[in-house]
Image (spheres, coloured by chain):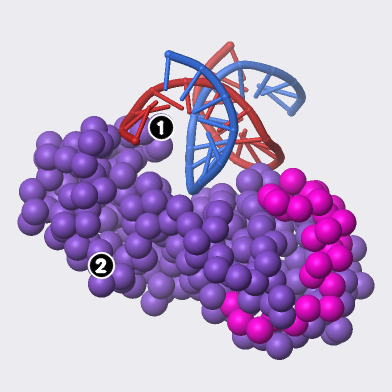
Chain colours: A purple, B red, C blue
Amino acid sequence: MPELPEVETVKEKLKKSLLNKRIIDVKVYYDKIIANLSSLEFIKTLTNQTIKDITRKGKWIIFELDSNYLLSHLRMEGKYFIKDVTLEPIKHEHISFIFNDFSLRYMDTRKFGRMYLLPKDDILNKKPLNELGLEPWDKNLNEEYLKIKFKNKTLPIKSLLLDQSIITGIGNIYADEILFLSRINPTRKAQKLTDIELETIISNTKKVLESAISLGGTTIRTYESSEGVHGNFQQELFVHTKDSCKICGTKIEKIRVGGRGTYYCPKCQKE
DNA sequence: CAGGTCTCCTGCTAGC
DNA sequence: TGCTAGCAGGAGACCT
């Protein structure tokens, strides 16, 4: 499940192959991936545009084209591969962007990924990016900001860490890791956290995500990496999918918080 | 508005 | 061994 560090890694990888390349054709095999256009309009608009830049906002990859932005969210299992143009599409391959000497294939086993093709204007203030909160390294992310965002909320901290309109980029794996490092129980009500605890969470968010990016993200379970992307952060995980605590040896508990599988150490993360 | 539940999907697995 | 029901999960829709 790609979260910010995996998306960042994929984005960097794509940049190496795609900058200044011109799309000469597009094939769509499953059109529900495209959220805001028919596949016909999607293909027509993309054809003959050049990739000027590739950036990231939260878990979104942003392809800057001549006159549009193509936004891509990998959700659970979306991935990109560079392949020879002549190779037939295989199972779970839904979109193929064809360039002169190679093709970029979008694969997605569960078909949860989504793309938006938008006109080139102020996309940060338009759906879907307008709903995103702060990047973890934004200088406006501080304890005051979280207090304002947590106002009138009764949800546990884990659920609010996953809320992309507050901090963007954290997913299920890193939420568990951030709370472990912060020694905070995932079920604690966000509103009841102290200022110091909020600051600890912010600092550990940056720490965990930076470390994960430097290791190329996390590769676990069914999440097979994209082209040339093989993360190693799974070796650094303290609680997510673990059996016993790396610090105290206590058995890691698995519970459900806000419908998500949640791992924590009952001794290190007391309620 | 806040929050709970359902939905989208497929592959894997526990259980018989 | 083979089958099936149940589960996993990011985010948006829908309901209360």
- Where A124 falls versus A18 (above or below)? above
Q: At x 54% / y 58%, what residue is drawn?
A: A126
Closer-to-camera residue (A42/A261): A42
Which residue, given by chain and number where applicable, does mark 2 sit on? A140
Q: Position of residue A64 (x, y in %)?
A: 64, 76
The residues colored magenta run: A27-54
Q: Secondary structure at mark 1?
A: loop
Chain containing mark 2: A
Which residue, given by chain and number where applicable, does mark 1 sit on? A259
Do the residues marked 1 and 2 share a common chain? yes
Q: Is residue A60 left or right of residue A176?
A: right
- Where A196 falls versus A185 (above or below)? below
Disc 1 versus disc 2: nearer the observer? 2
Q: Position of residue A45 (x, y in %)?
A: 81, 67
| Magenta-drawn stretch contains A44 | yes
Q: At x 84% / y 78%, what residue is drawn?
A: A48
